Amino acid sequence: MTSISTPQRDALKCDLHSSRRDEQLLHALLTTNQMAEADRLTIDYGITAETLMENAGRAVATAIMNRWNICPVVVLCGPGNNGGDGFVVARLLAEANWPVRVALLVPLEKIQGCASYHAARWNGPIDTLTTATLEGAELIVDALFGAGLSRSLEGVAAQVLTAASAKNTPIIAVDVPSGLMGDTGENMGAVPCVLTVMFFRKKIAHLLQPGKRLCGDLIVANIDTPSSVFDCISPDCYENHPSLWVNALPILNVDSHKYNRGHALVWGGWPMTGAARMAALSAARVGAGLTSVAVDTSQNDIALSVYAITLTSIMAKPVTTQQDLDTILSDKRITGLLIGPGAGVGSDTKLRVLSMLKSGQATVLDADALSSFQQDPESLFQAINGPCVLTPHEDEFSRLFADLVPTSDNKLARARAAAKISRAIVILKGNDTVIAAPDGRAIINANAPSTLATAGSGDVLAGITLGLLTQGMEPFLASAAAVWLHGAAATHFGLGLIAEDLPDQLPAVLKQLVQLKKQPDT
Ligand SMILES: NC(=O)C1=CN([C@@H]2O[C@H](COP(=O)(O)OP(=O)(O)OC[C@H]3O[C@@H](n4cnc5c(N)ncnc54)[C@H](OP(=O)(O)O)[C@@H]3O)[C@@H](O)[C@H]2O)[C@@H](O)CC1
Ligand SMILES: Nc1ncnc2c1ncn2[C@@H]1O[C@H](COP(=O)(O)OP(=O)(O)O)[C@@H](O)[C@H]1O
Ligand SMILES: [K+]
């Protein structure tokens, strides 16, 4: 059992030196600079730039041949190495008897380095890039710009991509859809592709929206970059994956009893009781030994009846005054707190949040608990001195951080800045949820299906996070695990999902994780 009183600080960094390091590094997200460094190190290692480009182009050609039957293809090549990859794709498809045409954005003399080596190995005709080049193509390979994109697309490149998109011809992107900024996911002229093949590792743009949507399906190709490049490159952002946190999940053993699994407390508001009840159930399902709801009985007696009648293993505790809440919070056996779902926005919620934070116990602040501090976010941030997780959606985020974090920044940068300002873990929710820690660690989640866009699913996420924190899991890893479990639970259920279905999917999803945890080290 993980000790409840001793948080595993910096656990992700520690884990990276653990037995799962190699597996974790498979999920590293690299910046374009780190990717260029990886190429440089690979070349030092003895693999030539020409071979790397050959491997990259071959990966794209293979992906195309695996998915489509022979058909007319046009390869759009740009001025840099992305275009060089395109020449390799064209040659390999042609060698496999595909009808291939190449269209080049710049005069051939402008192509340099290993791109020029591979351009010379293409012995078919080279058209000048115009919209006319798209005629007759049933597949389009977009090898115009990749990691070297430095400004918005314009002129003929923009026109051709727009025309290609309008034709609905499937577009396969080499590395990234041209016009997508690799480090931010910002769209500077890219059009939607059906497939993106990238090399060695994903970049941030492959997971952050709108990049993720523009990329279509993702294939990460092995181009023989040795994993030893990570001796020199230290990623600080990962795609969410169990290998990052499975070793930190709370485990049961023969000495486990309900008290050493932790006691979770959820604030139960009125009249929106469903939110707190779903959160409490989720905390219990993910393993909190005891779960209680502190029911707001300050307005009437019905609230207590509603909670008491609808909850079974979860206890309802009446709270009429602030003093009642403080008395409950003084019980040190309560090891995790959540307020926000159905709490109501206002000064009462603010006071309750501040009491919870003062207790020093791990606290999740969601929904109304965040919105209640819209006029005075500093008072919230000052009160955060212990383990704390904030779980805003975009509107809640802007209520707290609009004046502090530039809205023009990408989601990863905004979540990181907010975590630093608030000194809490920030789970910035959405299809591309970002989990960020004050020290800069960050994880981007990619397993969430859009069936989660249903009322109350955020309450369940807050409850899962609470349940893991309650058991003593380090807050950053608990947050990442919760977000992943939430997505996996939704996927496990499938279509027709409503929020109350989610807690019941957790046992099946946890079972898979327990198997993974038992597996010998990779
Ligand atoms: N491990 C790996 O990842 C491997 C990666 N490889 C491949 O290398 C690719 C990166 O290649 P790269 O650095 O040459 O950059 P790339 O994107 O081809 O273009 C740069 C050129 O475009 C120009 N330019 C920029 N923006 C522009 C605009 N809006 N409009 C017009 N022009 C613009 C820019 O000009 P400048 O900004 O200097 O004016 C420069 O001339 C990478 O994506 C992958 O496909 C593989 O080959 C091997 C292994
Ligand atoms: N299109 C989507 N794809 C994946 N996940 C989504 C999508 N829309 C919402 N979600 C997830 O569902 C949850 C919704 O939370 P929230 O907006 O707080 O809803 P509520 O307040 O109704 O509980 C978040 O975890 C969010 O990441
Ligand atoms: K591209």
Image (tube, grey):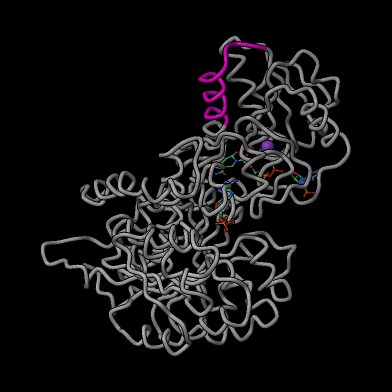
Badge count: 0
The front one of 482 and 88 is 482
Can you give x and y, in whole percent of width and height, for residue 186 in the image?
71, 51
> Would residue 396 be visible to someone looking at this image?
yes
Q: Which residues are magenta?
A: 57-71
Q: Main secondary structure of the magenta part?
A: helix
Q: Position of residue 169 (x, y in %)?
A: 72, 21
Locate the N terminus by quadrant: bottom left
Q: What residue sits 32% from the left and 56% below the top?
A: 285
Work out which residue is located at the far left of the displayed protein and give it: 254
Horizontal and vertical percent position of residue 84:
66, 33
The image shows residue 380, relative to residue 213, as above or below, that is below
Is residue 390 visible in this depiction of the protein?
no
Please provide percent x and percent y for residue 510: 31, 49
Position of residue 77 in the picture relative to residue 207 (left or right): right
The foreground one among 43 and 244 is 244
Q: Quadrant of residue 68?
A: top right
| Residue extending farthest front | 301
Q: Residue furthest right?
A: 155
Residue at 41 percent across and 86 percent down: it is 324
Q: Is residue 296 left or right of residue 396?
A: left
Q: Front-most of 221 and 248?
A: 248
Query: Is 205 left or right of 355, judged from the image as shown?
Result: right
Asked if residue 70 lies in the magenta stretch, the reply is: yes
Q: Relative to 357, does residue 512 appear above or below in the rendering?
A: above
Of 57 and 113, the residue lying toward us: 57
Instruction: Name the residue at 59% across, 9% down.
Output: 97
Ligand 3, what quadrant?
top right
Question: Which quadrant holds residue 264?
Answer: bottom left
Residue 362 sits inside the magenta stretch: no
